Amino acid sequence: MNKPQNNDMSNFLEDNESIDFALEAKKYLRFWPWFAIALFVCLVGAYVYLRYATPIYQTTAKIKILDESEGLELPTSAFVFKRVNINLENEIEILKSYLILERVVQKLNLNANIFEEGRIRTSRVKEPPFQFEQLIKSDNINRALNFEVEVNKTGFEILDVKNDKTFSVPNHNTYLLDHNLPFEIRISGEDQLSRVLGKKFLIKLNTVKSEVLKLKSSIKIEAIGEQSDLLQLTLKGQSKKRTEQIINTLINIFDQDGINDRQLVSKRTLDFIDERFVFLAKELDSIEIDKKDFKQDNNIVDLVSDAQIGLEQRAQSDEQVFNIERQIELTSLLQETLNDESKNSKLLPANIGLENNNINAIISEYNIAVLDLEKLVASAGNNNPSVKLLESKITTLRFNLDRSLIAYDKQLKSSENQLVNRNQRFKGRVSSIPQKEKLLRAIERQQKIKESLYLLLLQKREEAAINLAITEPSIKVVEFALSGIGPISPKTKIIYSGAILAGLLLPFAILYLMFMLDTKLHSKEDISKLKSSIPIVGEIPSIKSKGSKIFEDPNDRSILAESFRILSSNVNYMLPTSKDTKGKIIYCTSTIKGEGKTYVSVNLSLALSSINKKVLLIGSDLRNPQVHTYMDIDKSQEGLTNYLHDKSVNWRDILIKGFDLHANHHTIISGPIPPNPAHLLTNGRFNELIEEAKEEYDYVIVDTAPTILVTDTMLISQLADTTIFITRANFTQKNLLNFSKELSESGKLKNMAYVLNGVGASKSYNYSYNYGYGYGYGSKE
């Protein structure tokens, strides 16, 4: 299997190497009118397209996504290899998200579109040609609403396309009319009316969802470079202003959405703190009231001062108790001294510390009296009345002193009891201070906790308020929406270049397909591609004139005559040389009918006759005879069939002199069509005819049957000196040449040469062909 493929490949390469590019170019240049017409049509089409095509402009913007953590992170290995900490794909999806684009559509009211209906096309208007106000909310549009507005001199004619209802609006103002239209329109001023008078406009109110999806599919967002944190937004549209508005609005909404996300924490913090302030204020009020009540109930001004005062009071009270107890002891000692019998009339201690002036005065008076008594006794004796008087005075003083000491002792003990009781109260008050301090500290601790929490929340509230006020933007606009000066579509140069290219390529492609699909012969080069040794001895031109196609005049100088003279000369070179003077046998055959073998046979015989050679033309195509048609005689006239069938018929008796100007030319037509042509050709009579004719004629031209359809030619092919194989341009299939080549190489056809008939036939190659095994009786060439 590989070997045939290699052979095919080598043949293909050989064919490609033998391509004559000049010839190929000429083959296409023959159809230059096709190229001219196609070029003209394409250029006109390009002009019409550019005249009515809607220009499309491209708008672009560039933004930088800001990183919240930028500047806060230390460089890491990840930071070294990936400088950007932002997932740009997520940002792109957010930018193209339905929620973001829905806000854009609603803010710009993109679902309301106004078109102007023209003669050829309907285009969107850049600015509303009249005052337009949409009444229905965009969210309430559940299906597309279409209205046709025709402006006439008296007012509007508005057609509801869906419901097929017409509204007449006088004075070009719907505001003055009670209606249920989803919009209001009005024309103000003669100038505005003159611009739209007689025109028809289409108002389309689409659903928000459809517009969002349309915008989502049309906007293009991509990162600029792999290591960049910049995004480029691109949008194409008919109106520069509209596309710039859309992109700028999208940028603002995206930026505000990012700011709102960052502010959300601050807002929630403020709300939480405001809610907590209410509770904290109540709790602080309650604690302060409890503290006030606790101090009032416990008679506390200041716990430390109260404790110090209590201790001082207790110390003073203890000192007083000590002093009273000392006075009691001194009083008791003085009473013991006073009541001691052994110490009667003895001096009493004075100034021992008693704090009773009366007692001290009595003691002092008593001691004076005792001293006076001792002095008096020493001088006057015991019985002296003065002594007695002094003794009586001393006794009285002792009695008074005793009574005073008893009274003073009672007084001291009573004071002692009071001071002890008061001292107990002071002790109790001091001892209760730790408990009160503990309770007060618990109250104060709660108060401090609430106060610190209140202050903390107040601080956090201020911080949240500051963060809310100075929230950083989520993006940095590197370049706002900017449209190109000229439209990106249609591009005049590209359209005209494409038109020129199409005008050249379309006919070229059609011709290329025609040539590629064309399996017929057109020139001798197609035969030469067989790479065989079979020569090509002539090319017969196609004669389009209404004149005769027969070489009737030996002196004819027409193209037809000259081509057959050349053919006759070339055929002479094909004939084998011999020493005898016998005539040469030339067969004219073809692959199928319709290739012009009879036509070539007749004219070749006449060309040879024109040079004073004796020529015999034999019509041996017994199944489909055609020689008689060139001489205007009846095909049923006696001919070769009669000679082959009837031995009594002499071939010389059936000779026909069909061409008056060719005296040396004779013809034997085929005669009636027999039922068994092959049997007649092989019964030996045809061989006798050839042998005898060679003795009398210089050339015997035999018009034989097509080789691929019947075997008649193969049965008598050994009698030929040369075989002229007729092919026809624009008719003969190329693959049929292989059949003729095999016949030559196998020796079934002797000394074969090709003749190409009909050269220069219709350049469109539109000849039809029908061939097959239907070749037979009753058919005509």
Image: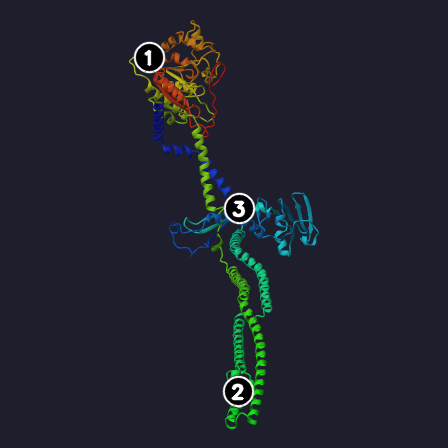
Q: CA distance from mark 1 to mark 3?
A: 95 Å
Q: Which residue is mark 2?
A: 345
Give percent across and percent down for residue 541. Answer: 41, 26
Using the image, tell me which numbered label, if any, was put on residue 582. Answer: 1
Q: Residues within 10 Å of mark 1 (few under 14, many from 20)?
A: some
Quadrant of the image for the N terminus? top left
Using the image, tell me which numbered label, if any, was put on residue 216. Answer: 3
Q: Is residue 612 visible?
A: no
Q: Does dot 3 land on a helix, a strand or a loop?
A: helix
Query: Looking at the image, is 399 positioned above or below residue 437?
Result: below
Residue 671 vs residue 88, the one in the foreground? 88
Q: Earlier in the sequence, mark 2 or mark 1?
A: 2
Give percent across and percent down for residue 301. Answer: 56, 71
Q: Residue furthest top?
A: 648
Q: Given the image, on which type of amino acid does mark 3 rest?
A: Lys
Identify which residue is drawn at 46% across, 44% down.
494
Q: Nearer the viewer, mark 1 or mark 3?
A: 3
Q: Nearer the viewer, mark 2 or mark 1?
A: 2
Q: Nearer the viewer, mark 2 or mark 3?
A: 2
Q: CA distance from mark 2 to mark 3?
A: 135 Å
